[in-house]
Image (cartoon, rainbow, N blue to C red):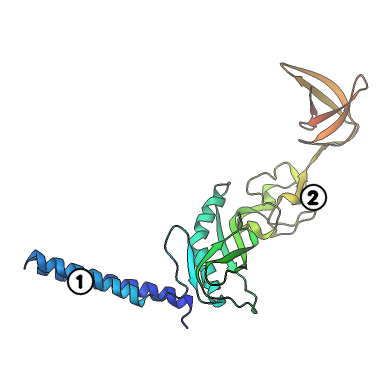
Amino acid sequence: MNSPKHAFQALRRWTSQAADLTAKAGVLTRVLARRGPAAAAWLSWLSLGLAMLVMGWSVPTHASQQTGPGQTYRVNSEADLPYVAQHWLERNLPVLSARESERGEPVRLQAQLGRLDGRLRLAPCAEVEVYAPSRLWGSSHLGMRCIQGATRWSVTMPVQVQVMGQAWVLRANVSTGQALTDQDLERREVDWAEDSSPVLATDAWDGQVTARSLRVGQTLRQNMLRAAKVFTSGTQVRVLVQGSGFQVSTQGRAMSVGVVGQVAQVRMDNGRVMNATVVDARTVRVEI
């Protein structure tokens, strides 16, 4: 039994043979054109017919891709499915890469197929449809279902998807609570999908400190950093009180540690305790 891989290779060979036959017949057509339009027309129809016969009689129907608005495949058994899945990936990964790149940084998707259950036995199917999750990322799968056959079936095949793009990588070991500098990092192409925490593709690490000890070669990700504390409880701070059309500056004392962008408690001069957003090491903001 021919494998789908061999079928696809044969399809390309037979297509080339048909094109070559048509080209040679075209040369004869130009020669016969000098002998009259009837002879030329007859040979043109003959060359087209021969090309169609080559394509129609020689292309194996086993595991071939179907034409039409949907991308479907004809398979003979479960042994065909890895080739179907691989062909689908080769056609769609460039599109998926472009779609992911539209979210921000340019990335390139590449995938490695897993294995089907060796006990699986499937009936032949005239049309198999391939479907995927809304986002192919990391440990994922491809689904394949028979939509036209004596027996309807549906299976999934595991696939490991790498999302290759530029990110920050540690070039030195750093300890917990350390502020990162340019000397600690370098840009490198890595697999964004290797971990569930998003990578830091930009310089968003600036002004933050490490949440835990990190080793050289690790890809910098969001869960590895935290905002740095800019003041401690008891620090005297300037309080900007803002409202609709006005802003008042006064003094207060921090009642908790301050982290830029987060909320800290501040005791005002009148003794009232308010929640304020930390702006910097000396300033907080209260919205009323």
For residue 243, what is the image quadrant?
Answer: top right
In this view of the protein, which residue sits in the foreground, 251 or 137? 137
219 shown above or below 238: below
Question: Residue visible at 63% across and 77% down?
Answer: 120
In this view of the protein, which residue sits in the foreground, 111 or 231? 111
Question: Residue visible at 39% across and 73% down?
Answer: 11
- Percent coordinates x, y for residue 242 in the rendering: 76, 21
For residue 9, what is the image quadrant?
Answer: bottom left
268 shown above or below 62: above
Question: Considering the numbered disc 2 on the image, is that residue within a helix, a strand or a loop?
Answer: loop
Which comes before the other along the chain, label 1 or label 2? 1
249 left or right, relative to 68: right
For residue 174, what is the image quadrant?
Answer: bottom right
Question: Residue visible at 70% across and 43% down?
Answer: 206
Give residue 46's mark: 1
Give residue 211's mark: 2
52 left or right, relative to 81: left
- Percent coordinates x, y for residue 225 in the rendering: 75, 48
Give residue 154's mark: none
Q: Distance of mark 1 from mark 2, alpha carbons? A: 76 Å
Q: How busy is the neighbourhood of tag 2: few (under 14 within 10 Å), some, or many (20 plus)?
A: some
Q: Residue furthest right?
A: 271
Task: Assign the C terminus to one quadrant of the image.
Answer: top right
253 shown above or below 262: above
- Percent coordinates x, y for residue 33 in the rendering: 10, 66
77 shown above or below 105: below
